Image (tube, coloured by chain):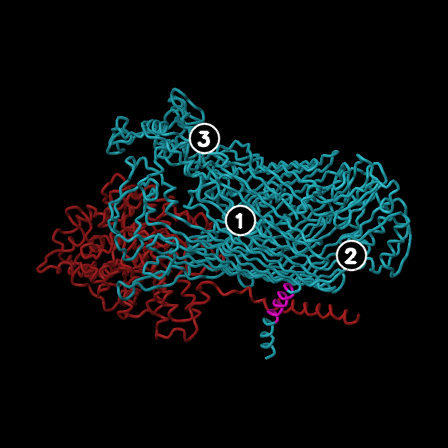
Amino acid sequence: MRKKLLVAIIPLAMRLFVIQLLVLSTVLATYATNSNGQEILNKRVSISISNMKLKEVLHKIESFTDVKFVFSSKMVDVSKKLSLTVVDKRLGDLLNQLLIPYSISYRVLDGQIVLYTKDETITGSPDGAVPISGRVIDSLGTPLAGATVQVKGMDKKVITDSKGDFTLTGVPDGATLIITYVGYLDKEIKARDGMTIMLTSQNNGLNEVVVIGYGERRKKDLTGAFVSIGTAEIEKSTAVSPQLAMQGQMAGVGIISGGGDPSARPTVRIRGVSSFNYADPLYVIDGIPIEEGGAGATVDKTNDPTRRTSINLYTIINPSDIESITVLKDASATAVYGVRGANGVILVTTKSGKKGHMRVDADVIYGTQKVPKTYSFLNTQQYVKFITDAYNQNPFLNGTTPIPIGQASKFGAVWDPSSPSYLGNSPTYDWQDVIINHSAKVRNYNVRTSGGSDNTLYNFSAGYTKNDGPFLGVNVERYSISSNVQSKIGKYLETGLNLRLIQENTHEANWPGTNDLGIYQAAPWQAIYDKNNPYGYAALWKTNQPITPTTFDISPVWESASDAFVPVSNYLGEMATYTNPFVHQTLLGSGYVQLQPIRGLKIRGTLSGEQLTISNNSFTSFDNWQFGETPANPYSGIKNATPGVRYNSVGTGSSVTTSLNKSVNIDYTRTFGKHSIDITLNGSHEEMLWKTTGVSSYVNTDNPDLRYIHVTGNEYGYNELHGHYVLIGYLARISYNYASKYYLDVLTRRDGSSRFAPGHQYGTFPAGSAAWRISQENFMQSVRFINDLKIRGGYGILGNENTTGGWQYLSVASITPPAYNIGAPNTPAQGVAYNNFANTDLTWEKLYSGNIGFDAQLFNNLSLTIDYYHKKTKGIIQSVSLTPSAGIEVPADLNIADVLNSGIEVQAGYNRTFGMVGVNLSANFTTVHNEVTSLANHTAIRSLGLEEGLPIGFIYGYKAGGIFQDQKQIDDWNKSHKDKISTQQKPGDIYFQDLYGQPASGSTAHNTKPDSLVDANDQTFLGKTIPGFYYGFNAGANYKGFDLSIFFQGVGDVKKYNTIRAAAESMNTNGRNQWTTVLHAWTQDHPSSTMPRAVYGDPNGNNRTSSRFVESAAYLRLQNVQLGYTLSNRWAEKTKVFQRLRVYVSGINLFTITKYTGVDPENALNPTTRQYLIGINSSF
Amino acid sequence: MKSNKKFPLTIFFTIILLTVVHFSCNKNDLNLPPPTASEASSFTTENDFKQGVIGVYAMLSDYYSSSNSGGGSGSAELETFFLPGDDLTNNGTEAYEDFGNAINPAEGKLSQIFTSSYIMCNRANKILQKIGEVKNGVYTTPNLKNYNKGELLFLRAFAHYMLWNLFGTAPLDTIVVASTAQLNPPSSKGTELLDQAISDLTEAATLLPSSWDAANLGRVTANSANGLLGKCLVFRGTAAKKTEDFTAAMTAFNKLSGLSLVANFEDNFDVAKENNAESLFEYQAGATINGSTNAWLSNDQADIGVASGYWQCFYNSTGTYMGGGLYTATAKLAGIFDPADPRLPYTLKTSDSTITKYILHDQSNGAVNSNNNARILRYADVLLLEAEATLQSGGSPATAISFINQVRTRARLMVGGGTQPADLDETVTDKNTIMQWIMDERLRELAAEGQRWFDLRRWTIGGILTLDNNFFSSITPTRIKFDPHHLYFPIPYSETDKNPNITQNTGY
């Protein structure tokens, strides 16, 4: 009975906990009490020191109170030593005792105690000169309280107040002010009343706080491999996808843009590619790990369709709401996310309010964009001549008689030069141009209100973005709202609520694969428009009206649509008869209650949830078939179709991911003397439910308002897929440091996942790291150029479970039941079969990750971080067909393959002010060595680019040797070779290399003994598709109100098989248009050593997958140039409206240096757009 | 002050308590309800077992239909055993007509029939395992548990019988693979595959009913098991030259009951006369649920393909996917009949050698497949096997000849006043002569039923026959590249690539 009661109480208790949490966080967000600096100064302290420098005394006070001192070493005289003992003394009194002898004053600002030298000018002004006032702000316009403003060459100093304002008296005309502030670059500026002085933060400020996953650390205290960017970098990107803001900015973070389509999914790979299955990192937004239904392996392995749409889920975060993005790279950093950490973790922290007056920020970006480059294609005259010549090289044979290209029965009169309908007389239609959106825009509007009292911080923001794609019909429109409130209730409690709502309407590629430069394939003579067609586009097919379900008999509109040269789908016509908009709705929320019962101990309960809904509604007009190359009977699939009735297809689908995350976090921080310890314990429970449904049917109306599915006799499709997943995790982390000099972090995470068999669900992921801040050692004090130097290393084990959809341990009934005719002969009896291998031993992929590196601050201005990483993924889940003798039909998921990634990362920054000019430079560089070290049965799967010893996704094919220049060369070659693919070799054809022989039976290993035969065995490694290195560098400068930044990024040591060129230089033409480069094809009169002869049907196999089409995809791109002007404070004040106003112009993707012959080495059909923008940042 | 201190402590302990509660209540959440029907949730009712058995029967489609569960796209496995014999020929360039290098471990259909056979075994093994574990009361129909077990043993035996006839040394499969450690069984040796089949059939014969009711027509019976058992014994006896196998075969055949030759030979190939008195085991083809038979879809779906694939081989010449056009009668087959033999017109059309068997009384349902059952084992086959078993076990030659004569008599009496084929002389005692009669009669009686290659193979292994290129009477004799190693088809690469314990058959 007791047990039962307990069971009943538990869920109730849980529910109460949740309700409490929500009520607290909403109601109490507005509740506040006052506190001020006196609270801090009233703290009681006991301390005993002997013969210690003042600086050390202050550090010591910091170490056992939660007080922070802000001061410049120049100010605090450190040479004198002192001794004293106080017991239970008021902090304020102690400070007076300590500082007055040194003529140092202090002030409490933002919970920190700012020290400054006594400024006599505050108390009196002997010459009675007019005082100079001003304000010191940071680059975002936030006032900087506690900055020191000094008159150069004089002893006059003043500290800014909480609004960043200062007043100096007795400043001579033309005097220069020096402004210093911890964490910011010093600045010298000519004194002027009413001035606003902007300080630039030291990017790598050691005291900068970095979010590390279940906690925060000062940068100087990090022991793992982290990299982060802040608003300054994020703001430069105008992309809808926040990931693109990271491109080229972070060492170790490789990003490949999804192309011009604004909602396309970028590929994000951290430190190489650690699995050949799901290698995406985990995204954590404000502490909430985001689960996306359908990402990774799906639940249903037999019916696989990956129902994850092509839309980038992370467009749910408006980049302008992001405060910082931190990437966790090594095991000691990511092990806190255990089984989901193997691919790295991206922590997104959104903006929250700061203490101070209410502040309103409004940002506007407006710009145009376009495709940076298009392809150069043959015009109609070139095309007709080219095709005629190529055909004549290898015409069809009737017996032994060649059929001439003009022969009417085979080709139609259009190929006959004497015919009036000869194609060579047709105009050229520019298919590329018509698909490009010539007025594509980028629009981005954001408003943010933030502020806070001592007890309550708030931030509300709203944004609207509309980005067109480079091609017609492609765009994304996003509305976003977010709210973030944190509030302290009394002394012990704090609560917060964070909500985010997104509505996004997306039009992606309208007709699959067409809203891109793939349209190049259309022949230049093929008409685009047709006034007489109801849609205005030229149809490819006609039929006698009315068409009936059974006699759907069509004939080509284009006379030349012979079996040899067919026209290409009229994509514009297809687009006009098809729509498929997506709506993306997201609700993301979290609330917490935090209790701080004793100093240093924080207990936080968090409840968070997400609901992601992606739905689409497609409509395909009955007439769509007219425009396709291979038209389908529009009546097919319709039961009892009625002739004359127009059956338009409609489809609707939705994918809903709901997840709920409960977690309790206990954090204890304490300093005992020189020993600092930080213990974090966390327990979390996540449940994710995913459901996708799709229905398709017919409607008889074209009216967009009436296109919905209702019950008729003509539903023809319904499908549904479910996912359900639970993860329970426990985390313990202990961080210790001695005197900020020796650091040790040990952590372990234990995860339980529902994806594996009972009994095999839990795994432990330990990691450890250590650091030595060598610059804190006494012996380093004399090395003046080293401001800070920390050596660190770590090792740990991580998991990746997204590569299995789960349930692999079940022996499942096959989805399509087998049947057999028992009894009545024509009535099959349904059976059942269990066709899969129930793998109860299946477990996550394990990553063994090591990292060693250092962080340095040199010459006051230079920061440098270098890391070496070595990661081995073991037990990669490979779907393997088992031995046939096992009788198991379905390939089984086995933990079988291994992959290694290693490399070096460098991240450097330099900040300095030269006179009036501030300069900042930063650069990063990453190398990646990727290698598959083991595969099932050591069997290469070259179709997937998998082979032991080679990188994932390598290019495999023949190696071209050269071009036969004459018949003698052909004869000589054939004395010792035979090309089994070639059926005709003529001068101008390519010869391919004989590299290997027939492999041993059952082996995929190359037989290194060539066999004189050029055949499939001679295909070989042609290049890697994972860049060997990538980099970015940024140069910035500011002068007076102007600021300029230039940002380059690029990749190197990477190859790409240029599929566009392979088709557009195939010269094997079936009617597809070709690049103008084919005009340089080999001929007797104009031989070429690179471009083979043009010949119909490619009898020699010149177009086989070979090194001919493998190109370097390395590039260097001028990604961003921005020139801004911040209006002076004086002007801004005069407006009585603005606190800050900055206008800028910006260009994105201005040029790319590459040898790649496609339009964009990242995406050859859907290139990243070039954008010209104007923007305004304003604060009120 | 005091109350202030109590406040955080209370909350502190509350939260600690909630934390404990929070996790203790979630521990079991990892065991989520499975999203789909699985073995673990099945086998609780008799129907689960019945459906499981149907799932094994369904694998017969892979042998006899035009498509299989793994391959699809018209990949009839029957080519591998219909075409190599000397009864059928083909004017295309088909591996199993021509032999030669085209029969190699990479050959796709071989891989398919190999795989299909093991899928059939695996399905049977799984349900057998479940029957072994079934609790009392799950089966409610009397005897059904034994019947099901008998059916499963029979079907597993049939798969082993096919594997022996095609590959000879393929691995045995009698277990449900439960771990990757069990994945790589070794090659079998000698007649081990037949040994297993014989053992399974011996047990099945004791479990199966003598007949089924109309609603279950088409399931295997005790006659099916004893008939196939006898056949396996004759095969093993021939290959291993074991007299006692022939004796044992006679014992098995003697257990057959209620079987007789039907009056008309042609009734055996008539869609309207399936499962008749002569039938021991048939592939139960039929029209499908939606009335169409799509050869390009897997039979593992209820709405397609439980249909016979020979239609495409014998009748419909439109496609080449079964291999280079029609399978026609060899000159040898056409010539072995007395022109007056009534079986001749029901076997082939002398004018163009096209096969008429199955076709004349067929009910095609779609252009590719037929819903006419493929006859796998019928009484005439048994009688001829009895003749062979009698002869080879040292029995009376007259008795042996009398079995042949039963078959000939039925043929002769098909037409009123028929004289051919005449009875063979029962006084002949020369063993070779009688054996030749048996071999010839098997060719006449069982032509184009997928039996001939298996017969030729075992007789050659047993030293009774010598095969050479001329023997196959091919339409394009120059292409035939037969070599004795073709008696054992190669173990497919799909197996040898992964299984290190396999020894490839010699010659590949």
A402 on left or right of A296: left
Whether residue A23 appears in magenta in the rendering, the answer is yes
- Kindly indicate whether the residues beneath marks 1 and 2 are on one polypeptide chain: yes
Q: Which of marks 3 and 2 is nearer the N terminus?
A: 2
Is A282 in front, or is A93?
A93
Whether residue A1120 appears in magenta in the rendering, the answer is no
Chain ID for red: B
> In the structure shown, which secondary structural element does the residue marked by tag 3 occupy?
strand
Q: Residue at x 45, y 63 (%)?
A: B36
Amino acid at dot 3: Ala
Q: Give the range drawn in magenta.
A: A13-26
The residue tagged 1 is: A897
Chain A colour in the picture:
cyan
Q: Residues within 10 Å of mark 1 (few under 14, many from 20)?
A: many
A579 on left or right of A829: right
Spot occupied by residue A492 in the image (x, y as percentages of width and height): 73, 64
Q: How far apart are marks 3 and 2 (CA)?
A: 70 Å
The residue tagged 3 is: A960
Q: Earlier in the sequence, mark 3 or mark 1?
A: 1
> In the structure shown, which secondary structural element does the residue marked by tag 2 occupy?
loop
The residue tagged 2 is: A66
Spot occupied by residue A617 in the image (x, y as percentages of width and height): 42, 53
User: Can you tell which quarter of the image residue A681 is in?
Assistant: bottom right
